[in-house]
Image (cartoon, rainbow, N blue to C red):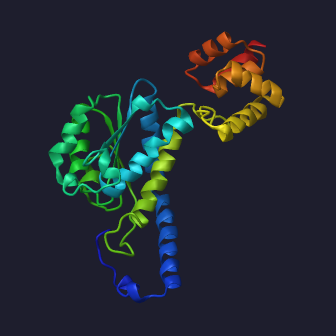
Amino acid sequence: MTEKVSEKYSDIDIWSTKDMIKEMFQGQVEAVAAIEVSINNIVEAAEAAAIRLEGSGRLVYVGAGTSGRLAVQDGAELTPTFAWPPERTIFCMAGGMGALTVSVEGAEDNLEAGAREMDKINLNINDVVIAVAASGSTPYTLGAVSRSNDIGALTIGISNNPNTALIANAKHAILVETGSEIIAGSTRMKAGTTQKAILNMLSTAIMTKLGRVYKGLMVDMIVSNDKLEKRAINMVCEITHCSQEIAINALQVADNHIKTAVLISLGESLSKSRILLNKVNGNLRYALEAINTNE
């Protein structure tokens, strides 16, 4: 479907710029709306992934071309946003990471390369593989999924074409039919938009289920610049209702670890705060409940 040429756009090269942009915009709106029918599939995938990742499991992103680039973009945000350990995020891009900026022709056609990549990273049963392919038939991605299934890893497939091998073989298939692109085969448009949105929802839901979000705040955020330092101070103040001075001091003592700073702002010592968070696997809500129970 994504490769199909639409008669509707056969004269797009002579359209006015405004008509062209309006049609592109409408396509984007329709693409996002098309995700709704797959919400339950996204939910099931996120819940299954969170269970695997409660232990030592890793998130493995697999893709080629535009799909691979979108996958890498999603995974790259997990460490700064949620303090997800970088060693637990693996990127498998057809043609290697250099293909992010320079197309490596033919790399995506190698089924065996995808399978070998899973062996190379020592994939195991605790890992979660997120495979993205608009066509649903990219050999490299299919090879990776097939090998992942053999190993017993959890596989999630995201595609925009029905009745494809990726949808058939992934343990959790997420299909969003976006139809013909305004420029035939240019899946960085409607298909790419849905892939990015699905990846956003999927990874954010996983991280939230793992306790890396509290009351809509990114409490596991890595404080790496002035803007984020101010955000961290505001978060501590909002959660504990303390003054900015107390929040700043707590963050300094906690080495800018927001969850620890929250507990310190409430009167706990650094060592006790760390022990308490460790007991509840870093879940701030559970840590706060434990403090309130002991009062």
Q: Is residue 130 left or right of residue 237?
A: left
Which quadrant of the view contains residue 14? bottom left
Position of the C terminus by quadrant? top right
Q: Is residue 211 above or below residue 71?
A: above
| Residue positioned 21% across, 35% down in the render | 150
Position of the N terminus by quadrant? bottom left
The residue at the far right in this view is 243
Q: Is residue 45 left or right of residue 284?
A: left
Q: Nearer the viewer, residue 257 or 137?
A: 257
| Residue positioned 63% across, 33% down in the render | 219
The x, y position of residue 212, in whole percent, is: 57, 32
Q: Is residue 128 above or below residue 24?
A: above
Tally the numbered discs: 0
Which quadrant of the view contains residue 221? top right
Q: Is residue 77 above or below residue 194?
A: above
Q: Is residue 29 above or below residue 21?
A: above
The x, y position of residue 171, in whole percent, is: 32, 43
The x, y position of residue 83, in whole percent, is: 53, 32
Q: Nearer the viewer, residue 28 or 177?
A: 28
| Residue positioned 57% across, 31% down in the render | 211
Q: Is residue 289 visible?
A: no
The x, y position of residue 246, in whole percent, is: 80, 24
Q: Is residue 112 left or right of residue 250?
A: left
Q: Is residue 89 visible?
A: yes
Q: Is residue 234 left or right of residue 220?
A: right
